[in-house]
Image (tube, grey):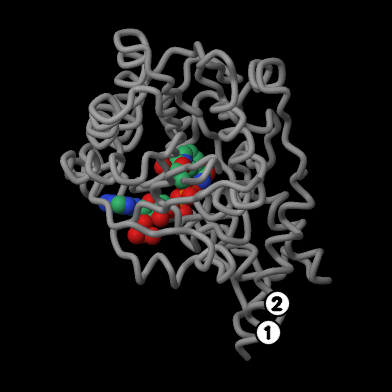
Amino acid sequence: MTDKPSALITGIAGQDGSYLAELLLAKGYRVIGAVRDRQKARAALPVEVADAVELVVWDMLDQRGMTEVLAQYRPQEIYNFAAYSSGAGMYDDPVGVGEVNGMAVARMLEAIRAVDAGMRFCQASSREIFGEAVESPQTESTPVNPRSPYGAAKLYADSMIRIYRQRYGIFACSAILFNHESPRRGLGFVTRKITHEAARIKLGLAKELHLGNLDAQRDWGFAGDFVRAMWLMLQQQHVDDYVLATGQVHSVRELCDLAFSHLGLDYRDHVREDEASYRPAETALLVGDIAKARAGLKWQPEVGFKELVQMMVDEDLRNLSNRT
Ligand code: NDP
């Protein structure tokens, strides 16, 4: 018998999962990664994390399997990061998105209720629940208006969390996450696409980068800061939902400028604005108001935008240089 705190993380091999695992291991937690493929997850995780966590097979569609895993490992905290999280998948498979990003949360809450209603649960929700936001900045009480199957599924999950909180007193909460990035961000996301291609151009492996609207603006933070906030959410006396963001917006153009200039390059020589990949402009600025997280969690982001972009460029350059 051990008195270490314990946590189960779904999606542990993704960006947020790996940062949270590092944070919890440093705090002395027993960390259980619930994954669909143990070998793939082990290979994707940083070696020190892969060696220190326990990986268990977990199916987001299998409530009985979830219940058995919770009964076996008895984690005190559960962080649900597993989800369809990017681009095309958000629209291509609406039923699959509904199952994994939405219904799976109801299954997990039922599993918690069946095994131990004292387990604490944090859900990675998304600013996509606001869709075409009716106000800016967005807060925890901004009216929801999802415009993608992804946003609709996350909203269903948030609704179930509130219901289980009210009806069964379960300590379950949603982190309404704005974009957060890192060197571990997938290559399909614009931030990583830019830092990775800038490094390739620097190394002579590519010449040009084609992007959509360079004046599109986003609220971009660092993933390491965001997982710390989610951990804090489960350490509170009172359960609540929080918007996690930076509260500041930057344009894709600024991102390009920072990334290329960090490598001694001028983005205007390499970046081409491709009208074919323009997305319709948002009616309201997508930016989070973090007043509640600042006051309630005593949290604020520590890594600024410039530092984040430079960290990503440096890591891409290092990895690509090692391969060439
Ligand atoms: P990643 O894409 O890096 O990681 C997602 C994880 O989910 C992966 O480990 C993946 O597993 C797992 N996953 C995907 N589909 C399934 C499935 N069908 N069954 C089981 N596991 C699955 O995402 P992030 O770490 O960036 O995001 C974490 C969470 O935060 C997600 O829920 C995302 O929706 C949410 N979020 C993230 C934002 C961001 O800016 N990063 C913004 C708003 C919300 P595998 O390794 O097997 O592929």
Decide which of 82, 131 is in the foreground and name it. Answer: 82
Q: Check residue 137 in the rendering and tell me which mark sits there, or answer none.
A: none
Mark 1 CB in 8 Å range of ligand 1? no
Query: What residue appears at the point 59 percent right and 26 percent down from the top-left corner?
Result: 235
Q: Secondary structure at mark 2?
A: helix
Cα–Cα gap, marks 2 and 1: 5 Å
- Rendering quarter of residue 303: top right
Residue 36: % across, % down: 29, 58
| Residue sitting farthest toward the top | 166
**Residue to which mark 2 is pinned:** 318
The reply to whether the C-beta atoms of the residues labelled 2 and 1 are less than 8 Å apart is yes
Q: Check residue 321 in the rendering and tell me which mark sits there, or answer none.
A: 1
Instruction: Answer whether residue 228 is visible to the viewer in this image.
Output: yes
Classify residue 257 as left or right of residue 182: right
Which image quadrant: the C terminus? bottom right
Q: Secondary structure at mark 1?
A: helix
Classify residue 201 as left or right of residue 149: right
| Residue sitting farthest toward the bottom | 324
Instruction: Answer whether residue 278 is visible to the viewer in this image.
Output: no
Tell me the amino acid under the disc marked 2.
Arg
| Local crowd size for mark 2, using a 10 Å CA cut-off: few (<14), some (14–19), many (≥20) | few
Residue 218: % across, % down: 60, 38
Decide which of 81, 166 is in the foreground and name it. Answer: 166
Query: What residue appears at the point 37 percent right and 12 percent down from the top-left corner?
Result: 169
Tell me the amino acid under the disc marked 1.
Ser
Residue 259: % across, % down: 73, 61
| Local crowd size for mark 1, using a 10 Å CA cut-off: few (<14), some (14–19), many (≥20) | few
Residue 265: % across, % down: 79, 70
User: In the rendered image of this protein, does residue 318 appear above or below residue 243?
Assistant: below
Query: What residue appears at the point 46 percent right and 60 percent down from the top-left corner?
Result: 188
Query: What residue appears at the point 52 percent right and 68 percent down from the top-left corner?
Result: 51
